[in-house]
Amino acid sequence: MLIIPCPYCGERPELEFSYGGQAHIDRPLAPTDLNDEEWNEYLYVRANPKGRHAERWRHIHGCARFFNAVRDTRTDHILATYKVGEPAPEIPA
Amino acid sequence: MFETRIASPFSGESGAITAVAPLGRAVLRCREADIGRVSDKLGLALPQAACRSESNGPNSALWLGPDEWLLLNADMQDGWVPGLAARLDGELCSLVDVSHRQVALSIDGERAEEILASGCALNLSLRAFPVGMCTRTMYARAEIVLWRTGPRSFYLDVWRSFARYVEALLREAESEV
Ligand SMILES: [Zn+2]
């Protein structure tokens, strides 16, 4: 089982968490100004990197808070976790 | 006068696992900036450190999240939650009476940690999970709130519909450890 460090609770077992997809996607402030292609991009198009990926997780069976994590999709190693609203941390290669 | 009793879903009796008498329960949500004032009005300090609890007489506040607490009242007086709500009048917060949504078991004795470890993935050693620590977590496939009330005592709160499932697995574990 993965051990995931919740920014609020500390290290906790994976089974307490749920996955929330790619992080740092801002809802457009004025959706009516977007054309179909831009709206499609916002709703559906996501990165699918082989390597580091900033993504949302929720400590649903713990503090229940959403937070962000940088995970390496090749190894499943979680390199950093941080609170919603904070920028993705710089992680040396 | 009819005497009303609250039906317990729990069945068995054993050395280490006992049903806790009915409690008053409420879930409180409030913003960080209001915690001090809300604590004063409740007469109970809402803990701000993660996974910690505070008690004052029969009342306890268990940290569930940075803006969420489970409030417990050991006296189970009718009107406790409406009384709290009246004291919080004017505050922008949410208080929900969940007294009958959950039921509780007490797990006590030398083997309490081992019995819980049958279905709980947390490190429950006294160093990692000291007295007063509390958290939402999982026991097998059921969400619970676990609170260490003593070096060898745990309080386990579970939604009523999962109560028998959790009880049966705990009693099976007790028979095996
Ligand atoms: Zn957490």
Image (tube, helix red, strand yellow):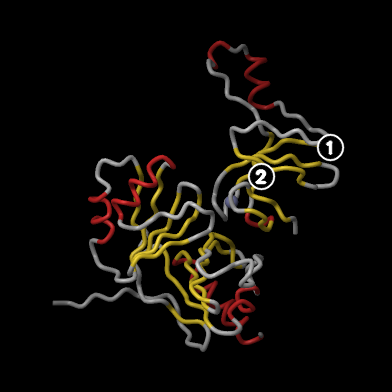
Is A31 above or below relative to B120? above
Location of residue A49 (image quadrant): top right
Marks 2/1: CA–CA distance = 17 Å
Location of residue A42 (image quadrant): top right
Mark 2 nearby-residue class (10 Å; few <14, some 14–19, many ≥20): few
The residue at which mark 1 appears reads as A51
Q: Is residue B106 left or right of residue A86?
A: left
- Which of the chains bears the disc numbered 2? A
The residue at which mark 2 appears reads as A19
Which residue is at a point 27% across and 55% down the rendered structure image?
Answer: B84
Is B156 above or below relative to A1? below
Is B16 above or below relative to A73? below
Residue at far left of view: B1
Which residue is at a point 46% across and 61% down the rendered structure image?
Answer: B53
Q: Earlier in the sequence, mark 2 or mark 1?
A: 2
Q: Is residue B113 left or right of residue B36?
A: right
Mark nearer the viewer, 2 or 1 = 1
Residue B21 or residue B124, whichever sits in front: B124
Amino acid type indicated by mark 2: Tyr
SS type, badge 1: loop
The image position of residue A80, as x and y in percent, is 73, 42
Task: Tell me, for residue A15, which label it has, or none.
Answer: none
Q: In which quadrant of the rendered image does the C terminus of chain A lie?
A: top right
Is B111 above or below relative to A39? below
The image position of residue B105, as x and y in percent, is 47, 75
Q: Are marks 2 and 1 in contact (CB under 8 Å)?
A: no
- Which of the chains bears the disc numbered 1? A
